[in-house]
Image: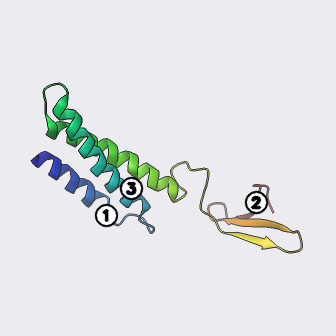
Amino acid sequence: MKKTLIALLGVGVLASGCTATGNTERNAAGGAALGALAGAVIGNNVGGGSASTGAAIGAAIGGTAGAVKGCREDGGCGSTNANRRQYYDERAGRYYYYDSRSGRYYWEDGSPR
C-alpha cells in the first residue's frame, strides 16, 4: 500500500502547474487515481496477489492516459479540434480564425483568408 501512495503522490507532484487551463493535470491525477484503484483490485486477484504492484502500474498507465486526454482537450497532442476563437467577416458572410503558429488568418474551412 505504501508503493501505491508514493506513486499517487509522485504523479500529483509531477503534474502540478504545467498548463494554463489545468485540463492535463486534472485528467492525469484522475486517471492515476482510477488506474491505481483498478490496478490494486486486479493485482490482488490475479497472479501472485500483489495489490501494490498492480496499483503502481495502474497509476502510471491511468496517469498517462489522463494527461493525453487533457492535452487533447486543450487542443494539443495531435488533436484535430484545436481551441480557436472564430471571428465573423460581415462582408464575406463567413467565419475566420487566426492561427498563432503560422501567424496567418484562415477561413473556417481551413483555406487561407
Task: State the residue at coordinates (11%, 46%).
Answer: 1
Question: Nearer the viewer's eye, disc 2 or disc 3?
Answer: 3
Q: Position of residue 87 (x, y in %)?
A: 74, 71
Disc 3 residue type? Asn
Report the residue at 24% width, 45% height from top.
37
Asked which quadrant contains residue 17, the reply is bottom left
**34 w.r.t. 92: above or below:** above
In the picture, the quarter occupied by the C terminus is: bottom right
Q: CA distance from mark 1 to mark 2?
A: 35 Å
Q: Secondary structure at mark 3?
A: helix
The residue where tag 3 is placed is 27
Instruction: Give the alpha-carbon distance from disc 1 to disc 3, as whole Å.
Output: 11 Å
Q: Position of residue 94 (x, y in %)?
A: 83, 66
Task: State which tag comes first along the sequence, 1 or 2.
Answer: 1
Helix or strand or loop: what does disc 1 sit on? loop
Q: Quadrant of residue 52?
A: top left
Query: What residue is shown with label 1?
Result: 16
